[in-house]
């Protein structure tokens, strides 16, 4: 029996949803071989569920491990975990409202993590989550210039989580991003919206100054469809495209 089962275990449905989130984000190109997505444990909020170190596109239920908010494995040993699990641990620790987290190296956002004078901000409807501008976390600010940019400790994770603040997304200089939301469906949708928004903003550079959004548009909540049929419709589509049950 695994440590997780011994502790009462998360529902199989949530594990299935986490597997689906891995497959979707891998299939859609948000996650490469190294990014990862996690969910907070339903019965133990001080724990979270995350795959062993495996390409997300191939994650299965048997790969899911349980970690505490220091990034330590709950239970004895087990397979090799992701190095950057501390990102997830720190965000869950700092943000009680967060139920799911994704760390990714999505190509579309990387230029905005190093550009000196460009900030991701609201342009198209899908970019609502960018708000007034996405913060960029520079690991060198607190940890010097000799890191390899990877988040290898809980202290580094907590510094990133502080830069994320109360928002849904923060960029990591020269590396990627962290996306946080209330549940897995929200985080998957936010990751895809992040990519769409970044691509639209880059495309816009060739076309000149844009039409400014109205004040009402700028004040709209970040999630255009927080519940209801639109959310279900998108989740079904993403699951089918990735070849998993919705
Ligand atoms: Zn990374």
Image: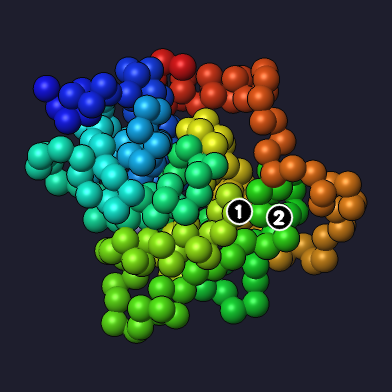
| Mark 2, secondary structure of its residue | loop
x, y percent for residue 32: 35, 48
x, y percent for residue 168: 58, 50
Q: How far apart are marks 2 and 1 (CA)?
A: 9 Å
Q: Residue at x 41, y 78 (%)?
A: 142
Q: Mark 1 points at which residue?
A: 167
Q: Do the residues labelled 2 and 1 touch (CB within 8 Å)?
A: yes
Q: Name the residue under label 2.
A: 131
- Given residues 31 and 188, the one toward you in this image is 188
* Callout 2 crowding tier (Cα within 10 Å): few <14, some 14–19, many ≥20: some
- In the picture, residue 132 is in which quadrant? bottom right
Q: In this view, does 182 lie above or below 9?
A: below
Q: In which quarter of the image is ligand 1?
A: bottom left
Q: Is residue 43 above or below residue 111?
A: above
x, y percent for residue 225: 69, 30
Q: Which residue is drawn at 88% across and 47% down?
A: 216
Answer left or right for 95 relative to 11: right
| Mark 1, secondary structure of its residue | loop
Q: Which residue is drawn at 75% across and 54% down?
A: 123
Q: Is residue 35 visible?
A: no
Q: Residue at x 50, y 63 (%)?
A: 162
Q: Nearer the N terminus, badge 2 or badge 1?
A: 2
- Given residues 233 and 71, the one toward you in this image is 71
Colouring scheme applied when the structure was drawn: rainbow
- Image quarter of the N terminus: top left
Mark 2 or 1: the one toward you: 1
Q: Residue furthest bottom?
A: 145
């Amino acid at each position: 029996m695994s440590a997780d089962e011994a502790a009462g275990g998360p529902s199989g449905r949530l594990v299935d949803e986490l597997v689906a989130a891995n497959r979707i984000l891998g299939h859609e190109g948000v996650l490469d071989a190294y990014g990862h997505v996690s969910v907070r444990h339903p019965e133990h909020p001080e724990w979270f569920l995350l795959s062993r170190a495996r390409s997300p596109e191939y994650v299965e239920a048997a790969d899911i491990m349980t970690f505490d908010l220091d990034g330590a494995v709950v239970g004895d040993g087990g397979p090799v975990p992701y190095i950057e699990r501390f990102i997830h641990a720190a965000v869950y620790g700092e943000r009680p409202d967060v139920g799911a987290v994704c760390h990714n190296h999505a190509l579309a956002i990387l230029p905005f993590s190093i550009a000196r004078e460009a900030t991701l901000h609201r342009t198209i409807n899908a970019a609502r989550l960018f708000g007034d501008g996405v913060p960029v976390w520079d690991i060198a600010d607190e940890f010097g210039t000799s890191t390899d940019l990877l988040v290898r400790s809980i202290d580094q994770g907590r510094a990133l989580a502080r830069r994320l603040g109360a928002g849904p997304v923060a960029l990591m200089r020269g590396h990627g991003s962290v996306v946080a939301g209330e549940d897995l469906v929200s985080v998957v949708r936010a990751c895809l919206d992040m990519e769409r928004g970044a691509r639209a903003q880059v495309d816009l550079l060739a076309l000149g100054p844009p039409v400014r959004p109205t004040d009402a548009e700028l004040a709209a909540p970040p999630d255009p469809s927080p519940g209801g049929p639109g959310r279900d419709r998108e989740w079904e589509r993403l699951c089918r495209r990735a070849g998993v049950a919705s």
